[in-house]
Amino acid sequence: MAENEESGKPVERRGRLTVVLVLATLISAFGSSFQYGYNVAVINSPSPFMQQFYNATYLERYGRPMEENLLTLLWSLSVSMYPLGGFFGSLMVAPLVNKLGRKGTLLFNNIFSIAPAVMMGVSEIAKSYEIIIVARFIVGICAGLSSNVVPMYLGELAPKNLRGALGIIPQLFITIGILSAQVLGIRNILGNSTGWTLMLGITGIPALIELLLLPFFPESPRYMLIQRGDEKTAKKALQRLRGSEDVDAELSEMRLEDQSERAEGHLSVLSLLSQRSLRWQLVSIIIMNMGQQLSGVNAIYYYADSIYATAGVKQNDIQYVTVGTGAVNVFMTIAAVFIVEASGRRLLLLCGFGICCVACVLLTVALTFQESVTWMPYISITCVIIYVIGHAIGPSPIPYVVTTEMFRQSARPAAFMVAGSVHWLSNFTVGLVFPFLERGLGSYSFIIFSFICLVTLIYIWLVVPETKNKTFLEICQMFAKRNKVEIKLGDVDLPLKERKESLEDAVRVTAF
């Protein structure tokens, strides 16, 4: 750590992108997060052909066509088993990451991708639609784990000045996964009667790549030092990730965090809920994850095809317009990667939810007058695109980043378990309830989403602080007053003299 010539105080070295850090980020995000996005969209385009297969299989088995209600039920199960599996995957996060580590959990998670990929790939040969439904549940478990573990892993690998940018990479790969499924779902590629099984089975390829390559990259240094007590391995991992032998300052900060929470041990979800010092952090991640999913993003995608059709887009061309919307989503998420460290997390969340709120109101007006005003459908399309832009820069990627940053090592697995459960239950709820909302309220259902965006925005404005470029201990101190606890600093004899002033001592939390 260098010294400032004028003051003589140590100047913190800013972390940089190294080859090891970049490759670990890309491999884990492609092998896990990509699958989440891919499996969200993979059954949308080939759904008519899959339903034909369901009906043909039933006819062959029982000698009569499948009743419409039964077909609707089976298809609903095929769709909803995915977020339901995601919920159960979220419940597995804390025990797995504490036992196997972050990298170890990602490698283990590939079982829940490769097995269902094979199952879905052979479903037509096996003449079983039940296999697809079960496989969708299993691959949902994979998504539930990866959506929580990848941000946790990358957040602990990254230096604090790059934590936001790297924390958005999983969401970027989710959007790339969605776009890839949309492109492959074009009728002339795989979204047809002969290609849909291959399209479903492709999800196993990223898992195989991750299984082969990720073992060559380090486990989270924070996990190795704080939870495993293996400082030697943690130091080697940190040196590889930083591309430097001088990692003493960062190790010192980890030791301080370790000492400050040693009495707590690993927090379970129940103990996390009872921790006074973490109360508002927990409320914040619940509100943000609910806002992320209940803001209507899935409903927007659900409604998009009918909006495009009403706007005069030819039925065969809608798939290309949908791909274009997916491309906008990817582009704006890439933009968020580059601006998050400059703008901060809070500003992106506020802007994102604000844009989504306004877009939902305007979309309601546009849909109401779409049939009576000739140019109004184009306003509807514009509103959809504006909404996608707003969600991509804030509500989609930032909650994962903030969840990593708001909690220290002992509480982080349980926090992600809570956040992931809320995320997937909210996702499941929207998928279940929106068709009834749309049938009962029509275009006015988007007013509800607008209200949710507004409430989330107000909460973030009043409660959530900026966490950019802060250590985990500093963020803990930022919440102390709101949690009505006092963060006191006591002397700790550590071997390193070059330490940040605010982190020279271990943290002790006491109630006012």
Image (cartoon, rainbow, N blue to C red):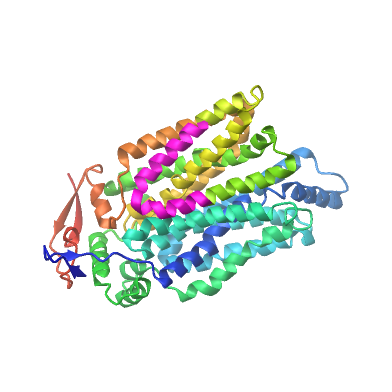
Q: Check residue 350 for magenta coloring.
A: yes
Q: Which residues are magenta?
A: 331-360
291 vs 36: above or below: above
Residue 408 as seen in the image, left or right of residue 388 = left
Measuring from the top left, give residue 322's x and y in whole percent: 63, 45
Q: Point out the residue furthest to the left here.
A: 7
Instruction: Give the number of callouts.
Output: 0
Residue 107 as seen in the image, left or right of residue 354 = right
Q: Check residue 149 for magenta coloring.
A: no
User: In this rendering, does residue 449 appear at all?
Assistant: no
Measuring from the top left, give residue 408's x and y in whole percent: 31, 57
- Residue at (42% x, 63% y) in the render: 153
147 or 269: which is nearer to us?
147
235 or 389: which is nearer to us?
389
Q: Point out the residue furthest to the top here.
A: 372
Residue 331 as seen in the image, left or right of residue 230 = right
